[in-house]
Amino acid sequence: MEGRHHQSSRLLMMGIVFLAVIFPSSSSPTTRRFQFNVQWKKVTRLCHTKPLLTVNGKYPGPTIAVHEGDNVEVKVTNLIATNTTIHWHGIRQLRTGWADGPAYVTQCPIRGGQSYTYKFSVVDHRGTLLWHAHYSWQRVSVHGAFIIYPRMPYPFKAPIQDEVPIIFGEWWNEDAEEVEREMMRTGDGPKISEAYTINGMPGPLYPCSNKDTFIQNVVPGKTYLLRIINAALNGELFFAIANHTLTVVEIDGLYTKPFTTTAIMITPGQTTNVLLTADQAPDYSAMFPMAANTYVTSIFPFDNSTTMGFLRYTTITTPRAKPLNRPAVYSLSSLYNLPQMKDTAFATGFSSKLRSLASAQYPCNVPKTIDKRIVTTISLNLQDCPANQTCKGYNGKRFFASMNNQSFIRPFESILESHYKNLTNHLFSSDFPEKPPTTFNYTGVNPFTSNMNTQFGTKLLVVPYGSSLEIVIQGTSFLSVENHPIHFHGHNFFIVGRGFGNFDVNKDPQNYNLVDPPERNTVGVPTGGWAAIRFKADNPGVWFIHCHLEEHTSWGLAMALVVQNGPNPSQCLLPPPADLPSC
């Protein structure tokens, strides 16, 4: 998206095409093909020009728009010297784990000068998802919207004037991959980003950015569907539009019971569809600010800036938009409905309102009983500095992260390929601990003196096909209590319970919601608390589970779930494609 003073009519510049929403009557699938070229392009933001990694020269990248039930083929050609992969975030990849994308989990990376065609179907998928690079920190700029139009009419009755993707991102003046390398080299936290962005635009509160401002034109009295995507690397965000309410109708590509709200909270990797009605009386500017800022739950340094765009009411007499020459005029004072950065009460209340639609057409198939309960801690860790090295983390140590005190290491080969070929491998094992190695007051210990050194390895959690699982994700107070967005590849899940403090197996399950819990692919585990999820492991393959704060994944806050083949051919992983990259 290399537009400058951005109008909604120029969304074609980032590859977004607003398709007429047609609900096909035919049940025969269509194959839709796309070409992605991963390439460098010089991009200027905040008075700083740098080579930026893009797809097809667009930032954000092109939108993929398909219909429910379609077959999708995306040929990715790597035109850079380093490796890359693409992940189709929220697509379950039923039996097609080869197309999932996380490097060294389901595939070896696509090397420079090579191509790989991702082939998968979007059966029983609809709504707003996203795609992004899944190698190092490349997704900072290699990302875009993935829109699946439903075969049946929307379950909400409001007539939609237009559908508008709104993608949040982060901008570093430096190469983000170099930021990650420096973090891992020194053991310190990462350099924070210089800006957040809306559709690639920082907005007028940043230096040199008046011309880089997202403006969405709206017609008074009309209703719009905003497809909101958080593609930021490390920022959980609040979002609001001055004087307007939003009606939430979908999360992570799954319909919800509608409810109105003055703002939303959205973690990296989550999507939220909202209805917006242009029902306010604008002043002489005809514009209302929209903004996103950080939801802060950590003691670590963070980007405390705010990205701003505008909703612009249009009439026959409204003049063409002029450059925003006086950014001070556009302060945050009118955004009284934008939560403060540490407003955990709002974040908690917003999450508690999310409920599955649970209708006859869109049932809530939450497992009422389970075959296994797994409890895993998610922790930030301090690691003793190796001999003869200088570490810049707290107290001269190194920062890492873990699940059940296991810091995940991705081997330089495909775990899925080894699993498929039944290869014996000393690089990983099938003994991920199903409960914490030590029982303690997880959220009440001293953040620094009680911190444990983590263990490193590639331990996999292996379950039989069709298992009904409950996974309790327990936060800890090591280093800092923090809200963690945990993303599951290969499966959606139901959030049956959440709470602060320590999960109590004797009491908390009694309060589970087994009627209409929200269904997602990314759960925000409450700061200093826990979340319980349930799902049926009915997708054979190897599936990455990780924190979607990219710094935490780099530090090892991840694991891999192996779902074994079922007894029938239709319950087995398909063979690998002929063009699968090799390591």
Image (cartoon, rainbow, N blue to C red):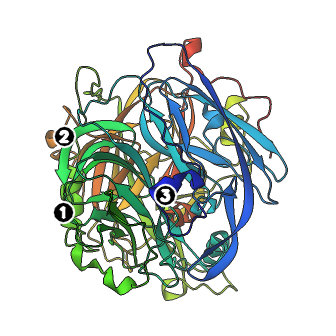
Assess disc 3: are there few (<14), some (14-19) or many (≥20) residues with their C-alpha within 10 Å of its C-alpha.
many
Residue 501 in view in this figure: no
Q: Are marks 1 and 2 in contact (CB under 8 Å)?
A: no
Is residue 256 found left or right of 452 in the rendered image? left
Which mark, by number, is residue 512?
Answer: 2
Q: Secondary structure at mark 3?
A: loop
Query: Which residue is tagged 1?
Result: 281
Q: Which tag is nearer the camera, tag 1 or tag 2?
A: 1
Q: Identify which residue, 355 or 406, lies in the foreground.
A: 355
Q: Position of residue 428 (x, y in %)?
A: 65, 46
Crowd around label 2: few <14 · some 14–19 · many ≥20 (10 Å): some
- Looking at the image, residue 236 lies above or below residue 428: below
Q: Amino acid at mark 3?
A: Ala
Residue neighbourhood size for the residue with mark 1, other residues' Cα within 10 Å, grouped as few (<14), some (14–19), many (≥20): few
Label 3: which residue?
231
Q: Real-space Cα distance between discs 1 and 3?
A: 32 Å
Which label was assigned to residue 532? Answer: none
Q: Is residue 76 visible?
A: yes
Label 1 to label 2: alpha-carbon separation: 43 Å
